[in-house]
Image (tube, helix red, strand yellow):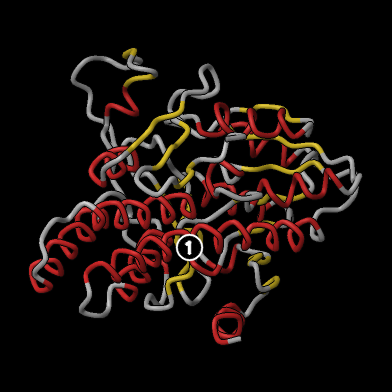
Amino acid sequence: MDNLPIAWHGDHVVIIDQTRLPRDEVYLRLAGYRDIAAAIRELKIRGAPAIGIAGACAVALGARKLKTKDTARFRRELAAIIDFIAATRPTARNLFRALERMRAAAEGDNIDDIKERLSAEAAAIHRYEAAATEAISRFGAELIPAGATVLTHCNAGPLATSGEGTALGAIIAAHRQGKEVRVLADETRPLLQGSRLTTWELQRAGVPVTLITDSMAGHFMKSGKITCVITGADRIARNGDTANKIGTYTLAVLARENKVPFYIAAPTSTIDSSLANGDEIPIEERDPAEVTHLAGVPIAPAGVAAANPAFDVTPARYITAIVTEKGVVRPPYGAGIKGILEG
């Protein structure tokens, strides 16, 4: 499967269990929508575009297994499945965009036809997200100069997108162009997506990468050792405010202080034009045990309180440019985002 996060097989999906990487490359066969929902909640599949694909596949599988021949009942049961999938991860826009597309594909009265359309739409969403990353990678690579040292956060490569990747896609594309780029990868506490996944993907792509702790980023920027920062995104408001993995806002502020360009790379399916600004983006709160434990081992005193917001919001004023499959958007983002959505 070449480390793609999800593959559709008609009556089931196969995912790579991202919680087991990099130590074990384990693939899971999931035949029910509840199994896929659990995999999304447990981060066995993660990354905004990949979550959207997984959510669409879950709806298609759930619909295929509904036995009722009554159209009204079928619609009620299908709506319940969609609502169940929507509750898995509240921040990633791609999931909700995919579910909107699945709802639209469910129009009509013939149940068998609806089931077929839902399967076709899930496959179309997968193709769209993969194709979008190819374009994002090309546009993003243009922003990375030869010999650059690029800082990235969390994981926005093929594992997160089922394609070339967004932030990592741009980096890997620049590497393939012979630009001799190097990467500093934040470990990305608390679940270490940077150290576990980003370094693994970059090593496989042959890109020189050095792992650093999250708290080292400011030091390297101040030392003049970072050419630019590029990350992915989970939701972008129509003014350009962007939610991404917790710690991204910190990097953006540090980048501004040290005059380092800060780029966001994401498909237009990540943009939520219904939200005026980042204050309206819902932020997922995850289990405090992810902070107090590491791989199941306690690293804090028993009973200590811990906060665990999974994302933060970077105001648009800190973002140098947003790279999408339709091109690079620069400030003012309100007009630029409207233009690419309508174009």
Displayed quadrant of residue 235: bottom left
Q: Along the line of sight, which residue is nearer the eye, 26 or 180?
A: 26
| Amino acid type shown at disc 1 | Ile
Q: Residue at x 26, y 55 (%)?
A: 64
Q: Quadrant of the N terminus?
A: top right
Query: 19 above or below 235?
Result: above
Residue 276 locus on image (x, y percent): 40, 78
Q: How many marks?
A: 1
Query: 233 above or below 19?
Result: below
Query: 76 above or below 213?
Result: below
Residue 267 locus on image (x, y percent): 57, 64
Query: Which residue is label 1 attached to?
Result: 125
Q: Along the line of sight, which residue is nearer the eye, 320 or 206?
A: 206
Q: Residues within 10 Å of mark 1 (few under 14, many from 20)?
A: many
Q: Residue at x 33, y 20 (%)?
A: 293
Q: Residue at x 55, y 50 (%)?
A: 161
Q: Quadrant of the C terminus?
A: bottom right
- Secondary structure of the residue carrying numbered label 1: helix
Residue 155 locus on image (x, y percent): 56, 41
